[in-house]
Amino acid sequence: MNADREVPNLFAPFQKRIKIAAFLISGGILILLLRLWGLQILEGERLLLLSINNRLRIRPVEAPRGLILDRNGKLMVENRASFDLYATPEDIPDIKETTHRLAEILKVSPEELAQRLSQRQALPAQPALLRKGIDEQTVMAIEEQKIDLPGVGLRVRPVRAYPTGGAAATLLGYVTEVSHAQLESREFRDFRPGETMGQAGIERRYDAFIRGIDGGEQIEVDARGKVIRLVQRVEPRSGFNLYLTLDSRLQGIAEESFRSRSGALVAINPSSGEILAMVSKPSYDPNQFSQRMTPEQWRMLASDPKHPMQNRGLQGQYAPGSIFKLVTTLAALEKGAIGPDTKFSCNGSFSLGSHLFHDWKKGGHGTLNLRQGIANSCNIYFYNTALKTGIEEITRVALELGLGAPPGIGLGDEAKGVIPSAEARTKGPGGWYPGNTVMAGIGQGMITVTPMQVLMMVSAIANGGTIYRPWVVRRVETLDRELIEEYGPEIVRKVNIDPDNLAIVREGMQAVVSEGTGGRARIPGLAVAGKSGTAQVVRNSGPLRGDHRDHAWFVAFAPADDPQIAVVVLAEHAGFGGSVAAPIAKSVLEAWFKLPKEPRMAQSVEPEPAEGD
């Protein structure tokens, strides 16, 4: 055996593997060290910022909306505190457990809460709104279990409050969250989801003034979502206050006088166009929009057959009935078809070809001049007057007085009404016949108006021929009473009607109240001018009840020689204007001039007259 023979190295293969492993481990450690160096040195500042931000939350603070006050500084719309419940998904370690606890407190299903939280999975660090406007008892229950509800918190925010409920609701409007459809529109590109804005009426038109500027809070939270400290706060800036032309005292009396009837009432200063009161019945309570309204609640309100959200003063279109006789009178005087001494005989009916037209009073009124015709609202007198005048001049005067066009108050949609144009008369079905002119002369047939249009017309008659644009906001101020904007009367035009003819009509309107169909608007010591009207809804020879009854109209202004207030009342399906609408107008006039209300008759319920206008 050769002693010098080389002994083989049995560990050589393992040594090679060990070297490779050592190399790999060294390389891995080097990579880790390089990564650690990069994280610490190159990205340390950025990661520190991310770490800090992971502990910080930005919480918006909603700005209180500006107040809305009446002409005398009395609050009509304000704000109140509301507690809202939020949850931040990222800060909830066990969503199932938390939703079950909350469900017991809120008395809702855990699935409903879980669904709302799941909608925020894409933004887990953003708080999700679970419930708006929770009551005091629920607030106490959540505070008591706060330690077991990580990531859940309460926020206080200002919400809109309307102390008088549905009074002037269709004029004031309401506030609610911007909808998904609105957020997709360019007009609302500056709004964020969940932000509120005025959606109707004054709240919508002046939202830019009222809304204010939201603030915010930067808060630090721990791993369980509990607030540790307030890092920074930017105070919200309240919206501007609006001072209206409305008189809240007059508004309340007007609402009360209307009772349970449906319809509209508008009162203005005929020498400036300032709206003093506006009633639309039935109404709705805008306070219900201050909290999150369910889709079912909205559908019920929007589909209500009584249309409580419609502003009947601006959007309701009705046949004017005998109120239109003022237009017929002016057209006839302008054309020279009649004069103050023109007389017609009324025996209760009027024949035209094979058609027989009736007066509202059985047996008629006898022989009347113009003043008496207006005072007694005699249909026969105005059948004759309309035929002698012609529909062209009647249409011209109606348009001149503002009928057939929206008044332009700027608070949403305004109905135009219908005045038969030349095109409609020539191209309409069957053409235009003398019988159409006869019916138009007393405000029936192809004529519709809104209460506000009628009031603009009557105001122009009252003030001598000037049409003012109706307006409702007097000024905009900051909380410190610094003036931002101020508004005043705007003349639309001077009507192209002889002032002497307007004076003749004013005299006839005084006779309506002093000796005619508007006697229930008579006020001792106050010269009131007015006109009653009863607009037929359906033709029926039998008794009319409910929705088949006529609409009751009454317009008035006072004092007759120096008008300070003009009122229009439209009571739907209420009967005769002189017996139903005139007393409502009287209550408003008494309230405006602060006159003692006349004592009611001993008989609590007056019998409904068998005929009238």
Image (tube, grey):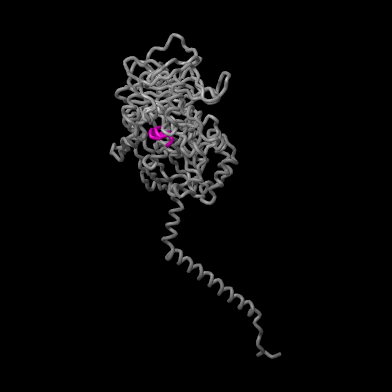
Image quadrant containing the N terminus: bottom right
Residue 602 location (% of width, % of height) = 44, 8
Q: Nearer the viewer, residue 111 or 496?
A: 496
Q: Residue 576, relative to residue 85: is it above or below?
A: above
What residue is at 34 percent from the left and 39 percent from the top?
Answer: 240
Residue 293 within the segment the image draws in magenta: no
Q: Nearer the viewer, residue 383 or 136?
A: 383
Q: In this picture, which residue range is highlighted in magenta?
A: 395-405
Q: Residue furthest right?
A: 1
Counting labels gives 0
Residue 571 location (% of width, % of height) = 47, 24
Residue 276 seen in render: no
Residue 535 seen in render: yes
Q: Nearer the viewer, residue 57 or 203?
A: 203
Q: Quadrant of residue 81?
A: top left
Q: Is residue 262 left or right of residue 488?
A: right
Residue 566 location (% of width, % of height) = 36, 26
Q: Nearer the viewer, residue 585 or 254?
A: 585
Q: Residue furthest top?
A: 602
What residue is at 42 percent from the left and 16 percent from the top?
Answer: 367
Q: Residue 530, relative to residue 234: is it above or below?
A: above
Q: Residue furthest front?
A: 353
Residue 431 location (% of width, % of height) = 52, 35
Q: Is residue 287 left or right of residue 590?
A: right
What residue is at 41 percent from the left and 43 percent from the top?
Answer: 61
